[in-house]
Amino acid sequence: MSQVSSQRPIALVTGASRTIGIGASIALTLAQARWDVAITFWRPYDVSMPWGSDPEEVLSLRSNLQNFGARTLAIETDLSLIDSPLRIFEAVERDLGVITALIMAHCHSVDSDILTTSVESFDLHFAVNTRATWLLVREFGRRFRSPPGTGRIISITSDDMAGNLPYGSSKGAMDRIVRSAAWEFKSLGITANVINPGATDTGWMSERQIDLERRRVPLGRIGLPQDCANLVKFLCSKDGGWINAQLIYSNGGVQ
């Protein structure tokens, strides 16, 4: 474990590979709020997606985190592998210290419906979105050493269902795991919440999709990564410590 002393609490943010993404926005917002921040990313997934992957984005994110005074660590890891959560925690504790907040913004998402989903795709979605979440939460609970009332577990979810079977169902299972931690870790004083940010503009929507989503939102705009990051910052603060075991819809009022 790292012997380096820091007055800043330490957050682990998974799924922070793209500058425009929710994970990166959360990491930067916490760094501004005087957290040290470790991030994980997995470029092969981004490469397989329409938006692609730029290796410079992770370097830029780390530089921006450091500009806010944060000590940082970036770990490229495949969360479908069972030993990845253990290796992540060991690396963060070695380089930064004991994690106070676990924020999970990672995901695997490939659209398919009940009839077209393959067993391989189903299993991969559950390995990344569900099993990795359980293993990360388990590792966090095993290693938590901060004062009661300071620990935070937060995950980012979605209520996609029809036409997106493996993603939506694996996220639903993830929700239950995280909210269960609020009760199972109550002796440690850890809060555990799930955020559903609704459709968020992270570069995956066409102009037509953005326009349709904007019409569904009473506030007349699409959700931005910063909207989710602002809520995460509040939940991680002392003022957010009374909110626990909740699935929070932070989607601008979409019904």
Image (spheres, helix red, strand yellow):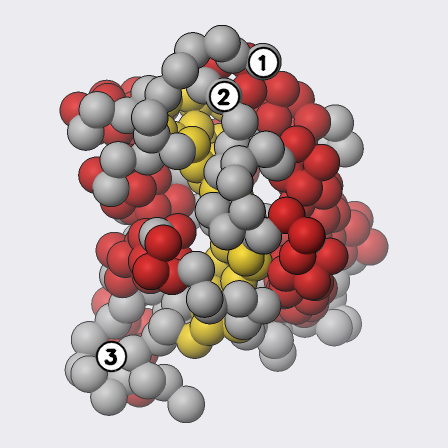
Query: Cα distance, mark 1 to mark 3?
Result: 47 Å
Q: What amino acid is labelled 3 in the image?
A: Arg
User: Quick one: label 3 or label 2, which is nearer the N terminus?
Assistant: 2
Q: Is residue 67 left or right of residue 74?
A: left
Residue designated by label 3: 214
Badge 1, how many Cα within 10 Å: few under 14, some, many 20+?
few
Badge 1 is on which residue?
1
236 relative position to 123: left or right:
left
Which one is in front, 73 or 119? 73
Number of other residues with Cα within 10 Å of mark 2, as a class: few under 14, some 14 to 19, many 20 or more: many
| Circle 2 SS class | loop
- The quadrant of the rendering that contains the N terminus is top right
Q: Are marks 1 and 2 in contact (CB under 8 Å)?
A: yes
In the depicted structure, whether residue 208 falls above or below residue 77: below
Task: Check disc 3: other Cα within 10 Å, few if <14, some if 14-19, many if 20+.
Answer: some
Q: Position of residue 204 (x, y in %)?
A: 36, 56
Q: Is residue 108 left or right of residue 26?
A: right
Q: Is label 1 in a helix, a strand or a loop?
A: loop
Mark 3–mark 2 contact, CB under 8 Å? no
Q: Secondary structure at mark 3?
A: helix
Q: Residue furthest right?
A: 119
